[in-house]
Amino acid sequence: MAGEMEKRSRSVSGEKPRYSAGKQLAREVFLETMNTIDVRRAMLSKLRRESTALVAGDVRFPLARPPHIVAFGKAANRMAAVLVEILGGSVDATPDELKRATTDDVLVEILGGAIEAGVVVSPSEPATRLDRIRYFIGGHPYPKLGSLKGAEAALELVSGLMEDDAVIFLVSGGGSALFEKPLDPAVTLADLLEFNRVLVTCGLPIEQINPLRKHLSAVKGGRLGARAYPARRLTIFISDVPEHLPSMVASGPTRPDESTAEECYSIVEEHGLAHRIPAVIRKRFEERTLEETPKADDPRLTGSQYFCLLSNRDAVAAAKAAAEKLGFICEVDSSEWDADYQQVASTNLTGLSALARAHPGQAVCTIVGGEIICPVTGRGIGGRNQAFVLYAATKIAGSQRVVLSAGTDGRDGNSPASGAVADGQTVARAHVLGLDPEQYLVASDSYHFFRTLGDTLDIGFTDNNVRDIRVWLDFGS
């Protein structure tokens, strides 16, 4: 509460933000962003139950009977709980109708609180286990046994449904690892682990990684949605990919797939991946025997409906508003966000300098979204956000600038932190402690660098994932 009052007083008084508080101000921007894009808040504001339908934005999804739900991804627990809350309390039943509900079944029908059954696959235990839902703990960034069991349970749940049945899929980022079942039964969990390790660390963008995953999976690339045919289907998703690539969210289990097997063969060959992936999977590429995924003209996917609950655009807008509330002149960076981390840092700094020149003596801020590309070059602990900040710290050394980069899921790479923050004194402080930024970058050990300095962002799992947020601050002269 004290922090909120301080922020309001700065905004109202017009006091110029001070560089001495720069890192804390950047943290405040990020934390306010996370509060704004809270999953429960978004669902309660954008979804509602209207009698026998669920309304999601412009989408109206009929509910003649209690729906089946399948939730997977980093936000699965929260999304499932809030959806049941929405389904259970929004029907306009009169007190007399409730009194006449002499059995539990009748009461459930009136309140609309029942779901027929559900499967939830997430990276952690739910705060509360809901009735009629089976829970599975999947792995991230690599699948584990719970990932396979959860996918199998989901396939079983949606198989054999009829035209008047309804399925609501709740999809969020991280689903590619958390929710998986190989199409080829000869592929073992160990094979999947190694295959995903290669993909995650090879430096390819998501639009090249996920087509490979799709063509080897029994649930990705539209195959889960096709299995639910002919039931009515609604997918409510939180996007952790570029907005023009919605079928890449969790590798698109419910959407038609625009990628092809031929593209997969080309990706593997062009980037020399064949020798790095397990033999049983490599054979599929060498013999060119990948099974094609369902496409847009597949009748099994006709009639499916989709609604984007949250995306990186929402997070960027929230961060901009938070920075302006703190007194910064703020712009959203217009350069490429999904590129090599050093390239992104360079272009971000160019934009920040231009904004500072346009407003001399003022505190300015640029907000950046997306997901940078940062190949793993060592065996340390960290992730793309902390590596970005570590590299950027060397570029702002000695200046009155601050940089923050963090993942909205609360986890950066293989570290327990969500990101890090640095200012113009970070490199000098590190040298005093005997820390060499370049060595930590090469070792992919940015987490230990920033943990030693006390500059990691530790917010824990957020039950959300809308890509990353980067905050650049310049306090003028």
Image (spheres, rainbow, N blue to C red):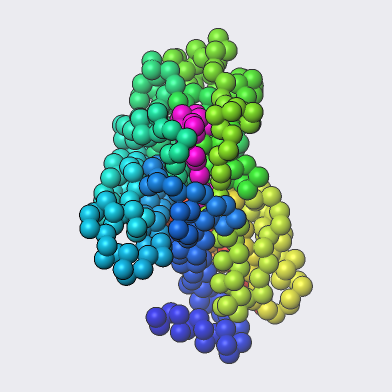
Q: Which residues are magenta?
A: 219-239
Viewer-nearest residue: 295 or 183:
295
Q: For the point 54% across and 13% down, which residue is it? A: 289
Q: Quadrant of the N terminus?
A: bottom left
User: In the figure, is residue 28 to the left or right of 143?
Assistant: right
- In percent of width and height, residue 375 lies at 54, 39
Q: For the point 45% across and 44% down, which residue is it? A: 168
Q: Is residue 356 above or below residue 38?
A: below
User: In the figure, is residue 331 to the left or right of 254?
Assistant: right
Q: Quadrant of residue 351?
A: bottom right
Asked whether residue 222 is drawn in magenta, I would say yes
Residue located farthest toward the top when viewing the structure as drawn:
287
Q: For the point 43% across and 33% down, which residue is it? A: 162
Q: Is residue 247 above or below residue 76?
A: above
- In percent of width and height, residue 446 lies at 45, 50
Q: Quadrant of the C terminus?
A: bottom right
Q: Quadrant of residue 459?
A: bottom left
